[in-house]
Every structure is written in structure tokens, then in C-alpha cells.
Image (spheres, grey):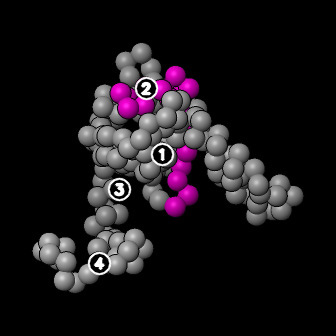
Amino acid sequence: MYFCLGKEKNKMSILVGKEFCKVDPAGRFKFPSALKKLLTPVIEQGFVIRESIFDECLELYPRKEFEAEIETKIAKLNPYNRNDRLLIRKLSEGNPVELDANDRLLIPAEQKKAKHIEKEIVLISKINIIEIWDVETYRRVNEESPVDFAELAAQRLGRIEEDTPGLNA
């Protein structure tokens, strides 16, 4: 189930949620209705899907969000620098995708293969984009993760006091 925080016209809201979806043999999945409702202002513009460079997932951007990232980050890199060119190329490797008449989204075959997407996926919100994970990969990554999320939250988001009731229960 998804919900959003804040709302601006023609701009994606901050999304919060997680949804499991079946993928058909052609690589299509039914876009969750709750998510579609939240993204109504951006659906007309379409999406861009690209491979994450950090995780074993795909990233689904509303087209405007993808364009903003290109304009604000990638465009500042130096195209005459070899490493910058490689980064520009990798981060720009997105495929435009749109919902079809049956509210399905097609995962391009090359990206589906690269991230080992099989029969079921999980959509995970990541502020203004959606991660698309193969369910088994997502479970494996989370099970193998040595991260103590409570400790990480305390370090990165603030200090959790030992004597605060309910926090250590």
C-alpha cells in the first residue's frame, strides 16, 4: 500500500510504501491502483526506467524527475573527462516506459535480464522514485545485510536515548 507526503501539481510527491506484483512472461506488471492514483499528475508524462548503479534493482522515475536529475547532476559533469563520460553514459541509460491501456508497465527485456527479474517483483518507494526488485533478490539482499538498522538510524538520523520509554522494547 502506498501513500504520499505533500503534493505539487505535475510533480511527484514523496512516496511511502511497498507493493508486490506478478510479472507476466512478456515482462509486464499491473501497476498498483493505489500508486496509480497518487501518480495521476505524472502518468501522462510517462516514466523512465534504468538500472541502479548501487543496488540489484531497477529504478522507475517519472520522466520529469529523470530530466531534473540529468539537468542538475549529470549535465554538470565534464564530457571531456573519460570518467565523467562513463558516468554520464551509465546514468543516462534509461528507457522511456508508459502504462498501457490495461495499466501495465513493460520492463524492457535487457533490464529485466540484467536484474534477474522473474515472476514476481516488489516495488519499494525511495522518496521520489520507485525501486523495482525481483522478490527473491530483495529477500536475499535483506537477509544477507549485516546492517543493524536501529544503529544506522541512530548514527545517521539522530541519537536514540537509552532511557526513552518504548524505543528499546
The picture quadrant where one finds residue 159 is bottom left
| Tags 4 and 1 touching, CB below 8 Å | no
Name the residue that disc number 2 marks.
40
Q: Give the spatial CA distance, label 4 vs label 1.
A: 27 Å
The kind of residue tagged 4 is Ile
| N-terminal label among 1 and 3 | 1
Quadrant of the frame with the N terminus: top left
Q: Residues within 10 Å of mark 3 (few under 14, many from 20)?
A: some
* Relative to 166, residue 34 above or below: above
The answer to the question of whether label 2 and label 1 lie on touching residues, with beta carbons closer than 8 A, is no
In the figure, 91 relative to 36: above or below? below
User: Identity of the amino acid at label 3?
Assistant: Thr
Q: Which residue sits at x=43%, y=26%?
A: 40
List the single residue furthest toward the right.
80
- Which stretch appears magenta? 36-54
Look at mark 3 in the image and give the residue it sits on.
Answer: 137
- The residue pinned by badge 1 equals 128
Q: CA distance from mark 1 to mark 3?
A: 22 Å
Q: Residue furthest top?
A: 101
Q: Is residue 39 magenta?
A: yes
Work out whether residue 95 can be spotted.
Answer: no
Pointer 4 residue? 160
Front position in the image: 152 or 145:
152
Discs 2, 3 touching: Cβ within 8 Å:
no
The residue lying toward the viewer, choosing from 79 and 114, is 79
